[in-house]
Amino acid sequence: MMKTLNAMLASLALAIPATSQALDIYAFARGGAAYTAVKGTEAVNPFIALPAAPSDNNPATFQGSMGIANLNNDHSVAVGAFGAGFVVNPNFRLELEGSFQKESDYQIDVSLGWQAESGPFKTTLLGTAHNRISIESEVYLLKAYYDFPLNKHLVPYVMAGTGYAKNKASGVQNFSDNANWNEKWDDHSSNEMAWTVGLGLSYIFSKHLALDLGVEHRNLGDWELKNMPTTGDESIKGKLESTTLLMGLRYHF
């Protein structure tokens, strides 16, 4: 993480225009919480149950797509961020930020079955695969801020940024009809394009110190689990998003 952040800080230094005036450069540290959610989840398994013909006595075998019977898809976790920036003018500033989002925990249940007879609606339900999945993220963003100074202390702002996220997924699967089934997915990491938009309020204590409080929507790209050594023929994937609240201090040199 430090190696990546150092490279980003070097890029920021190269982006600073040459000027004879002193630059307003600052460093910051922030902490807060992220309300995370997985979206667009897909499950692949050769034993995914086909939907039964719906009727009063024969409801659909599963709800949702790709055999997903139930999805507990949101969680709140801690986030820490740090980095550096510089003030271009009284209204515009740029930042490079590295942040770490702790593991978010989800449960994705998949209905499994076996086609006992020919035809699309002749499926015997075998049971449900309960997948307990955790995803943690390292996020690196170049962020642009537009400030709206109200007075010498209060400064509302809007922000947009882009970069990438490293999403690491891990998981364990249990099976409803086999108490001894407790199998671990292979861990999987992926580097994904990420973006964020947000707004907030800064309180300026002095020319050196400011307090920032902001809320962001972050799209952190895809996550995936694509191999369970016991079976080798399953995968689960989706997208990761968060609503993130961050508060912290920045020090202007």
Image (cartoon, helix red, strand yellow):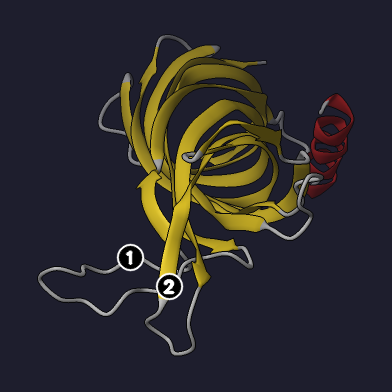
Which quadrant does the N terminus fall into? top right
- The three-letter amino acid code for the residue at tag 1 is Thr
Residue in the foreground of this view, choosing between 245 and 185: 185
What separation in Å lies between label 1 and label 2 (alpha carbons)? 8 Å
Q: Can you say whether 87 is above or below 48 in the image? A: above
Q: Residue at x 27, y 69 (%)?
A: 60
Residue bearing the label numbered 2 = 123
Judge whether residue 228 can be spotted in this image: yes
46 to the left or right of 57: right
Residue type, mark 2 in image: Thr
In the rendered structure, find residue 61 and report the number of the disc placed on it.
1
The answer to whether the residue labelled 1 contacts the one labelled 2, judged by CB atoms less than 8 Å apart, is: yes
Q: In the rendered image, is residue 158 in sight? A: no
Instruction: Identify the secondary structure beneath mark 1.
Output: loop
Whole-percent x, y for residue 161 in the image: 56, 50
| Residue 143 drawn at (x, y percent) | 58, 45
Can you tell which quarter of the image residue 206 is in?
Answer: top left
The structure residue drawn at horizontal position 58% and vertical position 64%, both measured from the top left corner, is 47
Q: Nearer the viewer, mark 1 or mark 2?
A: 2
Q: Left or right of 253: which side holds 128?
A: left
Residue drawn at the location 55% of the way across and 47% of the way down: 144
Observer-nearest residue: 71 or 1?
71
Name the outermost residue toward the front.
117
Between 16 and 231, the residue placed more toward the observer is 231
Quadrant of the image for the C terminus? top right
Badge 2: residue crowd in 10 Å (few <14, some 14–19, many ≥20):
many
